[in-house]
Image (spheres, coloured by chain):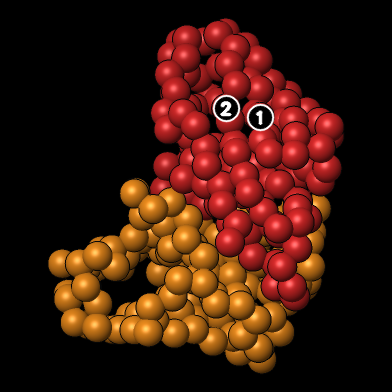
C-alpha cells in the first residue's frame, strides 16, 4: 500500500455521461497530481493542486476539471465522456511543490471504460 | 517543453541475460531524473532519483546512470520477477510547479 488511495478501482460508463474519480493523498502530502495513462500515449500530466490551489495544468481537456478540498483529498471530474477517454487515471502525491528525493507516490489508479 | 524518449519499446531477455534500457531527455534545467517500475494494472513504483551527470545508483540487480542527455537502467542477470514496464521521468527547472514528464516506458519480459 503506497498510502495514496484512489476510488473507484474500476468504472464502466456510457458515452456522454459524467464521472468523478477520488484521490486521498499520502498523509502529510500537500501536492496532488492527476495523470492519464493510455496504451499509445503513456503517462500524460493533467493537473496539479497544492494545498487546495491549482498549481499547474497540462493537457487537460475542457470537459475535465479537478479540485482539492480542505482535507487535501482531490476529485477529478470527467464529463461528456467519449470512447477515447477510456484509460487508466492515476493520482500521485508529494510533500511539496519542489523536488523531492522520491518524486511522487502513486495510487493504484482508476480504470475508466467508456462504452 | 520537457521531452523523454525511451528505447526500445519492448525487450525480451532470457533469465541471466544482462541488458540496458535507454532514456533520452531534453529539459530546461534538470532538477531530477526518476526511474519507476510499473506492474500491469498498478501504479508506478519509485526506483531511483538521479540529479547530476556522472551519478549512479544501485538496487539489487538494477543500476541507473546519468549523463547530460541520457540515462541508462542496467539490469544484471535478470530474473522473471523483474518483468515489468520501466518508466523514466524528468523534472525540469521551470518555475514553481514540480510536475514530472514521463516517457512511454519500456516493457521488459524475462523468460525463465
Badge 1, how many Cα within 10 Å: few under 14, some, many 20+?
Answer: many
The C terminus of chain A, quarter of image: bottom left
The colour one sees for chain A in the rendered image is orange
The residue singled out by tag 1 in the image is: B72
State which tag comes first along the sequence, 1 or 2. 2
Which chain is rendered red in the image? B
Instruction: Tell me the quarter of the picture where residue B58 sits.
Output: top right
Protein chain holding label 2: B
Instruction: Give the number of the disc on residue A71.
Output: none
Q: Secondary structure at mark 2?
A: strand
- Give left or right: position of A10 versus A31: left
Q: Secondary structure at mark 1?
A: strand
Residue B46: percent from left, percent from top: 66, 46
- Give left or right: position of A51 versus A57: right
Residue A37: percent from left, percent from top: 42, 57
Q: How many marks?
A: 2
Residue found at x 40% / y 69%: A8
Residue found at x 69% / y 80%: A50
Protein chain holding label 1: B
Residue B54: percent from left, percent from top: 84, 32
Residue A1: percent from left, percent from top: 61, 54
Query: Could one spot residue B44 in this view of the protein?
Result: no
The residue singled out by tag 2 in the image is: B21
**Label 2 near label 1: C-beta < 8 Å?**
yes
Badge 2, how many Cα within 10 Å: few under 14, some, many 20+?
Answer: many
Considering depth in this image, is B103 or A49 the residue closer to the camera?
B103
Real-space Cα separation, disc 1 to disc 2, in angstroms = 6 Å
Residue found at x 70% / y 73%: B97
Amino acid at each position: 500500500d503506497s498510502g495514496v488511495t484512489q476510488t473507484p478501482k474500476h468504472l464502466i460508463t456510457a458515452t456522454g455521461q459524467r464521472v468523478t474519480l477520488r484521490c486521498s493523498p499520502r498523509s502529510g502530502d500537500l501536492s496532488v497530481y492527476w495523470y492519464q495513462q493510455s496504451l499509445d500515449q503513456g503517462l500524460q500530466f493533467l493537473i496539479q493542486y497544492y494545498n487546495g490551489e491549482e498549481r499547474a495544468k497540462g493537457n487537460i481537456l475542457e470537459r475535465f476539471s479537478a479540485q482539492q478540498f480542505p482535507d487535501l483529498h482531490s476529485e477529478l471530474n470527467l464529463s461528456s465522456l467519449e470512447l477515447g477517454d477510456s484509460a487508466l487515471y492515476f493520482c500521485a502525491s508529494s510533500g511539496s511543490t519542489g523536488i523531492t528525493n522520491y518524486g511522487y507516490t502513486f495510487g493504484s489508479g482508476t480504470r475508466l471504460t467508456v462504452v | 517543453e520537457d521531452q523523454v524518449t525511451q528505447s526500445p519499446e519492448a525487450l525480451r531477455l532470457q533469465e541471466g541475460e544482462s541488458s540496458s534500457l535507454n532514456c533520452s531527455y531534453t529539459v530546461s534545467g534538470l532538477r531530477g531524473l526518476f526511474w519507476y517500475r510499473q506492474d500491469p494494472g498498478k501504479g508506478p513504483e519509485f526506483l531511483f532519483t538521479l540529479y547530476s551527470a556522472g551519478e549512479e545508483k544501485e538496487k539489487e540487480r538494477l543500476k541507473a546512470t546519468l549523463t547530460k542527455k541520457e540515462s541508462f537502467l542496467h539490469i544484471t542477470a535478470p530474473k522473471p520477477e523483474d518483468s515489468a514496464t520501466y518508466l523514466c521521468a524528468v523534472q525540469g527547472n521551470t518555475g514553481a510547479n514540480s510536475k514530472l514528464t514521463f516517457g512511454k516506458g519500456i516493457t521488459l519480459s524475462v523468460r525463465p
